[in-house]
Image (cartoon, rainbow, N blue to C red):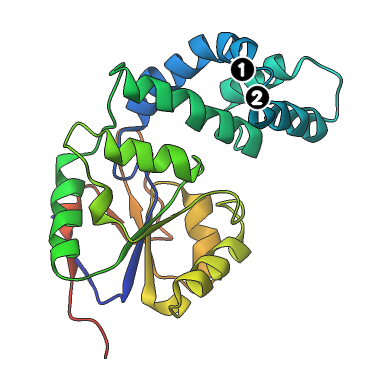
Amino acid sequence: MTHLTFTPDVVLLDIEGTISSQSHVTNVLYAYLRERLPAYVAEHRDDPVIQKILADTIALSGTDEDPVETLLGWLAEDKKAPPLKKIQGLIWEHGYAEGAFTGHIFDDALAALQRWHAAGVPLYIFSSGSIQSQVQFFQFNQAGDLRSLFNGHFDTDTGAKVETASYGKIAEAIGVAPERLLFFSDNPRELVAATAAKLPVVHVLREDTAPDARFPEIRSFDEVELGPRAN
C-alpha cells in the first residue's frame, strides 16, 4: 500500500471523484436536476434570483436560445457554468429538504477528515458546485451533518478549478502560504493548475480515474498521514 506523509498547515479538497463518488453525483444529483429544472424555472420565473440566472445564461451563451435549453445543454456537457451551478444549488435544496437523496462520502475519506479535524488541521472545500450546494451536500449527508468538519468553502466565483490564479486566491483568502496548502483532487488538470501555484498536491484515484505519473497518488485516504505542522 502506498503511504504518503505531508505536513501541511491547511488541507483543500475537491468533492466529486475525490471524497465522494462521481457516479452518485451523475446518476442521482444530476438526474434529479435534469428532471426538475424546467418546471422549477417555470414556477419561479418571477423570482429576481431566477431572472438573473436566466439573464446570465443568455449573456454567457451569446445566443438567443431558450435559457432553459441552454442550461440543460450545459448540464449534459457537465459545463462548469456559474448560472448552472447557482440554479443547481436552489433545486438540490428542495431535493434534500424532501428527502429525495442524501450526499455521499467514501468511508475512508470521512475517517481521514474526522481524524484531521480532531488534530486541528483546517479543512476547506474547492468544488465547481456552488457554495450553497456544497454546504447542503455535507448537511444532508448519508453520514450525518458534516458541516462542522470544514472551515470554509470555495466555488467557481473564485475562479475556474483549472486556472492557476484560483489557487493563489484561495491561499490568500485563507491566509496561508501556497506551499503550506495541500490539495486533493481526482482531476489532473486541476492538479497542474494547483502545482503551478506552488501547492503540494495528491492525485486521488477513484472508480475509473486513470493514474498520472506526474503526481503522487492514492486509492484511499488511509494511505495518507499528516505529520506535525510547521510552527
Where is residue 18, by image quadrant? Answer: top left
Where is residue 107, by image quadrant? Answer: top left
**Residue 188 appears left or right of 113:** right
**Residue 172 appears left or right of 61:** left
**Residue 135 appears left or right of 102:** right
Q: x, y percentage for residue 208?
A: 35, 33
Q: Which residue is mark 2?
A: 47
Q: Can I make out residue 3 in this image? A: no
Question: Which of the two residues, 186 or 137, is positioned nearer the viewer here?
Answer: 137
Q: Find the residue positioned furthest to the bottom.
A: 231
Q: Can I make out residue 48 in this image? A: yes
**Residue 85 appears left or right of 146:** right
- For badge 2, the amino acid type reads Asp
**Residue in the picture at 58% in, 61% down:** 166
Mark 2 touches mark 1? (CB < 8 Å): yes
Where is residue 79, by image quadrant? Answer: top right
- For badge 1, the amino acid type reads His
| Numbered badge on residue 137 | none
Q: x, y percentage for residue 65?
A: 81, 16
**Residue in the picture at 36% in, 47% down:** 211
Question: Which of the two residues, 228 or 139, is positioned nearer the viewer here?
Answer: 139
Q: x, y percentage for residue 226?
A: 19, 70
**Residue in the picture at 15% in, 46% down:** 108
Q: Which residue is mark 1?
A: 44
Check the picture and name the quadrant holding the N terminus: bottom left
